[in-house]
Every structure is written in C-alpha cells, then in structure tokens.
Image (spheres, helix red, strand yellow):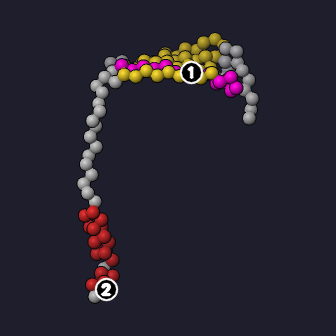
C-alpha cells in the first residue's frame, strides 16, 4: 500500500532520495594551507641545441622573494638570435628588454 502511494507522487520519491543522499554525505572540511613560504626562492635553467632540427633555445630564471629575474633566447627561422631579458617585482611590475643579434648561420631543416 505504501508503494502505491509513493508511485503516484514521483516528486516525493525524488525528494526522499535526495534527503537520504544528503544525510549520508559528511561535512567536508575546508582546505587549509599549511606550508607558506614568505620568501620563496628558486633558480632554474635549460639549454636546447638540437642538431637534427636546428632548434636552439635557452632560459634562465631566478626568484628571491617577490623579485624574479631571467632571460630566454632562441634562434629565429631567419637565423637571428632573439634574447629577452626580464625582471618583475612589486614596485616596477614586469619589464622586458628584447635584443636581436646579427645572423647566425641558418640551417635548413628537412621535412619529415
């Protein structure tokens, strides 16, 4: 008899299912940041010189607190070397200086 009453009220069945599901879910604690470094520091660098493809690029960067300094360079398809020197800090924001060096011997790349 109870089933026939419930089947005539599908909204009630859905509501009961939602209530049962909600009752089974526990309270999820909020995430708490435990590791905070007030003066973060890092340094990284990479250099790529691929003789097969001619891909040549590099990047060097360091951070001390809120100050980041670095550079990256690459050989453009026309053989020029583009170097970007950059710095970022809370006072001056992000600043970059782009330099374009004279031609390097351009290398033809084979199509695969």
For mark 1, give the secondary structure: strand
Residue 16: image quadrant is: bottom left
Horizontal arrangement in the rendering, residue 15 relative to residue 98 (left or right):
left
Q: Which mark is residue 56?
A: none
For mark 2, give the secondary structure: helix
Asked if residue 40 is among those painted magenta in the image, a careful observer would answer no
**109 or 84: nearer the eye?**
109
The residue positioned 27% from the left and 63% from the top of the image is 24
Cα–Cα span, label 2 and label 1? 74 Å
> Where, quadrant-wise, is the N terminus in this rendering?
bottom left
**83 or 38: nearer the eye?**
38
Horizontal arrangement in the rendering, residue 69 relative to residue 32 (left or right):
right
As drawn, 39 above or below 34: above
The residue positioned 43% from the left and 21% from the top of the image is 43
Name the magenta segment's main secondary structure: strand
Q: How many marks?
A: 2
> Where, quadrant-wise, is the C terminus in this rendering?
top right
Residue 107 visible in rendering: yes
Horizontal arrangement in the rendering, residue 43 relative to residue 104 (left or right):
left
As drawn, 40 above or below 22: above
The residue positioned 29% from the left and 33% from the top of the image is 35
Residue 74: image quadrant is: top right
Dot 2 corresponds to which residue? Answer: 4
* CA neighbours of label 2 inside 10 A, class few (<14), some (14 to 19), many (20+): few
Asked if residue 59 is among those painted magenta in the image, a careful observer would answer yes
Residue 65: image quadrant is: top left
**53 or 73: nearer the eye?**
53
Dot 1 corresponds to which residue? Answer: 47
- On the image, the x and y values in percent for residue 85 come to 48, 16
The mark nearer the N terminus, 2 or 1, is 2
Q: In the image, which residues are magenta? A: 50-64
- On the image, the x and y values in percent for residue 96 come to 46, 18
């Amino acid at each position: 008899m109870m089933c026939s009453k419930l089947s005539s009220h599908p909204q009630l069945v859905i509501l009961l299912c939602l209530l049962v599901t909600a009752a089974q879910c526990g309270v999820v604690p909020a995430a708490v940041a435990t590791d905070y470094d007030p003066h973060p520091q890092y340094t990284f660098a990479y250099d790529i010189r691929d003789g097969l493809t001619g891909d040549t690029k590099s990047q060097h960067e360091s951070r001390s607190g809120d100050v980041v300094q670095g550079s990256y360079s690459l050989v453009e398809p026309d053989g020029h070397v583009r170097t970007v020197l950059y710095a970022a800090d809370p006072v001056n924001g992000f600043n970059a200086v782009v330099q374009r060096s004279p031609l390097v011997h351009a290398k033809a790349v084979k199509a695969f």
